[in-house]
Amino acid sequence: MRPLIAIPMGDPAGIGPEIVLKTVDDEEIQRTARCIVIGSKKVMEQAMKYPGSPKLEIVTVKEPKEGRYDAGVLNLIDLDNVDMERFKVGEVSGMCGKAAYEYIAKSIELANARLVDAVSTTPINKESLKMGGVNFIGHTEIFGALTGTADPLTLFEVNNLRVFFLTRHVSLRKACDMVTKERIIDYVIRCTEALKKLGVTEGTMAVAGLNPHSGEHGLFGDEEVKAVYPAVEELQKRGYKVVGPIGADSVFSQALHGKYNSVLSLYHDQGHIATKTLDFERTIAITAGMPILRTSVDHGTAFDIAGKGIASAVSMKEAVRLAVKYAPAFLQG
């Protein structure tokens, strides 16, 4: 049976509603997945009026099992939480931030209860969340809190390249301070387990270098000497298939061509630049290390083009495709 994927609609004022429509209407998605959308019926109806948007039959349900997963149908759990008289496309809004959070929370509730196989998320806006009284800075923190996961892992996948992140939303200066032997050991162990959960059991993980040419043994930067080399040596003694540090100017290309099954990027932009330069739209985020599977687009709400019918759904479709790819192994793991 096709995996059942929950899709929270995202910020109603952004491009989420329109890329959801385009995704659900896609023939390949229909063949491989059953999609249940959590959102607002009124907003989805408005989105169908945007130029180029598909006109689908909206079937409102209370639970995913009630859905009619046929072509031309959008199955929707309608939270009816948007006042259309106050709603404005393309604008930061506390109402929309709160609504977006509620769609995500409902999706997580369904996944926690095993009523869906995975969640594929659409973009949200941090400013709107804050205005709506939501005390999370993004999806990862929401999923961590609502699944009881203390430190979820971020994994990017694009083509054959998989990239984990040792640090995320911290300053570059702080990220350097967070490159420690203990942290690298912890992350490699958890990243290895996350890959196994996705069915990836073969191959070697590479730890990227932090400094140019991995510091040239301390000539310009000693983080590799103090942290990376000792961590990798300890992990290898424990039987983990990991190497490093490998210079960041080459490790991503090597992984793309199959030398490594994944790369541990040491800071946010290091891995983001590598993956998004390769293919921005098809770079998909997977939040790993949780009891549920979550994939996501890796772009924003694009308020400037919302409602114009020109938003690309490539990333959303790819997020669902990855959820379908990994759900069987994840649920058995």
Image (cartoon, rainbow, N blue to C red):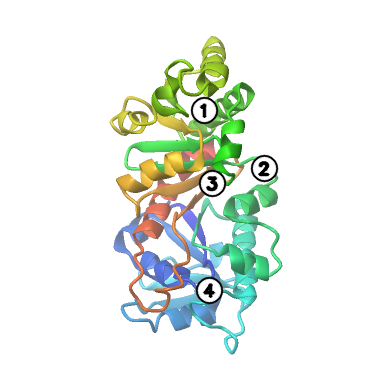
Above or below: residue 175 compared with residue 4: above
Please, what secondary structure does the residue beneath circle 1 have? helix
Q: Where is mark 1, residue-wise? A: 192
324 lies above or below 28: above
The image's mark for residue 332 is: none
Q: Quadrant of residue 314?
A: bottom left
Q: Residue furthest top?
A: 237
Let me know if residue 103 appears in the view: no
The quadrant where residue 20 appears: bottom left
- Left or right: 41 with respect to 72? right
The secondary element bearing badge 4 is classed as loop
Report the residue marked by disc 2.
Answer: 149
**Which residue is located at x 33 percent, y 47 percent?**
277
Q: Earlier in the sequence, mark 2 or mark 4?
A: 4
Mark 3 Cα within 10 Å, few/some/many (few <14, many 20+)? Answer: many
Q: Nearer the viewer, residue 317 or 91?
A: 91
In this rendered view, identify the residue nearer to me: 159 or 108. 159
Q: Position of residue 25 (x, y in %)?
A: 35, 68
Disc number placed over residue 12 in the picture, else none: 4
Classify mark 4: residues with Cα within 10 Å, few (<14), some (14-19) or many (20+): many
Q: Earlier in the sequence, mark 3 or mark 2?
A: 2
CA gap, disc 3 and disc 4: 23 Å
| First reached walking from the N terminus: tag 3 or tag 1 | 1
